[in-house]
Amino acid sequence: MNEPLLIKQVQNGDRAAYTRLVEKWHSKIYRFAFRFFADEDEAHDITQKTFIKTYQSVNTLENPEKFSSWIYRIANNLCLDELKRAGRRKSTSLEAYMEQSAVLEGDVALPDADLQNKELGHILQKALLTLPDEQRTVIILKEYEGLKFREIADILEEPESTVKSRLYYGLKSTKRVLKNWNIKHEYLNNG
Amino acid sequence: MDKNDLQSKLMDYLYDEMDPDERQRFEKTLRDNPDLKQELSEMRATRNLLQEDSDEITPKKLLLIQPDSDKSSSDESDKPSGSAKIFALKTFAAVAAAILVTFALLSFANLQVTHSDRGTLISFGSDPQPVEEPASTEAFITEDEFYAMMGELQEQNNEVMAAALDQSRREHQQQMENVIQTLTAYYDQRRQQDLILVSEGLAQLEEETYYRYLQTEEALEDLIFALNLQQNAE
């Protein structure tokens, strides 16, 4: 079933349609929130709140074709609200993380490639946390959710040029952060 | 082409969102600008690195996917909710268990209840033995003995009371010491936590200021680069 029709059914009070909608979007919203906070519990909370908010205000959505942008916007706003509420303490600095993680020290050998990749995944998540929120959001939506610039601009209600500029500086900052910590020089230098 | 245009086109090219004609023109610009080409290469490398974190992220199961009760039909709202049913069941089970435990205890203690003309006698253990009446008045004590015994009892009571008061005073003192120790530890912990929070806040601020500084520096570099590019083009 196509999404706009599903949304119309939800707007008409069809509970089964709402459940299908949740099943369809659950993992996407969780993934987005997880990349935003690098924390499973936060991601879970944001996902729950997003679907509650979606259910409460789905009737205000005039154009069901725009549901994708609408739900991502809700999730992003909830993430930003949560950061404000928590006084930004949730964004751990990369430095603090590195101090805790001896694995990242250059002279420590990792037992195998899988573990190394897993650790790299954690570092990348933490590196994203060091970016300004607006750059992090754009990187997540573009790099991990694979959205078009037009779609991201629609979600953030900003011009496409602003989105591209945030992505440009976001990528540069990410590279700088990772390079500062000597992470995967072979990737950064020989891409 | 100004700096913003260049950045915008670089992003379009990097994420393959250019039409073919525009793509050809930009590739020519790239060939003419080794610095721009290098920048593109670095951006690609960063993208590749970000894609390293492409592990499947499995969400936890949602707890609240059912809609609120405000849309539920009236017949459904009349029925007790799941939690109310569980509560009623738990209460019933608790009452039943309490009754069972009471019977078990009474049975274990061998409760005896007997009734006679002199009243009702309740006892635990074996059957109650009849109380023997005194054999003769000689068994009674004299008045002097009675007062002596009372005096002795009074003395014993005084000693017991004094010991109890002393014990109570010591316990009270110990409790006060424990409370003071707990409070001291609590305030010390709070102070440590506050210090950590202040320290984290300062570190965060320092970090953000540093990145803003770097961004400004980068923007200036880009500006100079664009100006040079423009001059070269002229």
Image (tube, coloured by chain):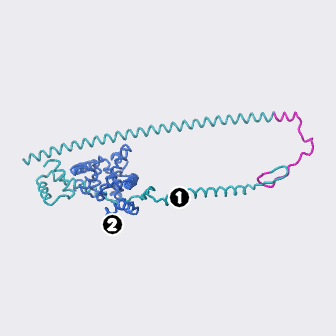
Q: Nearer the viewer, mark 1 or mark 2?
A: 1
Type of amino acid under label 2: Met
Image quadrant in which you'd find residue A148:
bottom left
Q: Spatial distance from mark 1 to mark 2, Cα to Cα?
A: 35 Å
Name the residue carrying label 1.
Answer: B80
Instruction: Tell me: residue A178, above or below residue B172.
Output: below
Q: Which sits in the foreground, B153 or B63?
A: B63
Q: Is residue A138 left or right of residue A56?
A: left
Disc ID at residue A187: none
Is the N terminus of chain A in the top left, top right, bottom left or bottom right quadrant?
Answer: bottom left
Which segment did they paint magenta? B121-150
Q: Judge by depth and name the residue closer to the eye, A147 or B214.
A: A147
Q: Extreme front residue here?
A: B74
The chain that appears cyan in the image is B
Chain A drawing hue: blue
Q: Residue furthest bottom?
A: A1
Query: Residue B84's spot in the image, x, y percent?
Result: 54, 56
Quarter of the image that includes the C terminus of chain A: bottom left
Pointers 1 and 2 within a single chain:
no
Residue A134: horizontal and vertical position, in percent? Answer: 28, 48
Residue A162, magenta (yes or no): no
Q: Which residue is mark 2?
A: A1
Local SS, label 2:
loop
State how many labels appear: 2
Give SS at disc 1: loop
Instruction: Determine if the magenta segment contains residue B134.
Output: yes
Q: Position of residue B85 (x, y in %)?
A: 55, 58
Quarter location, residue B134: top right
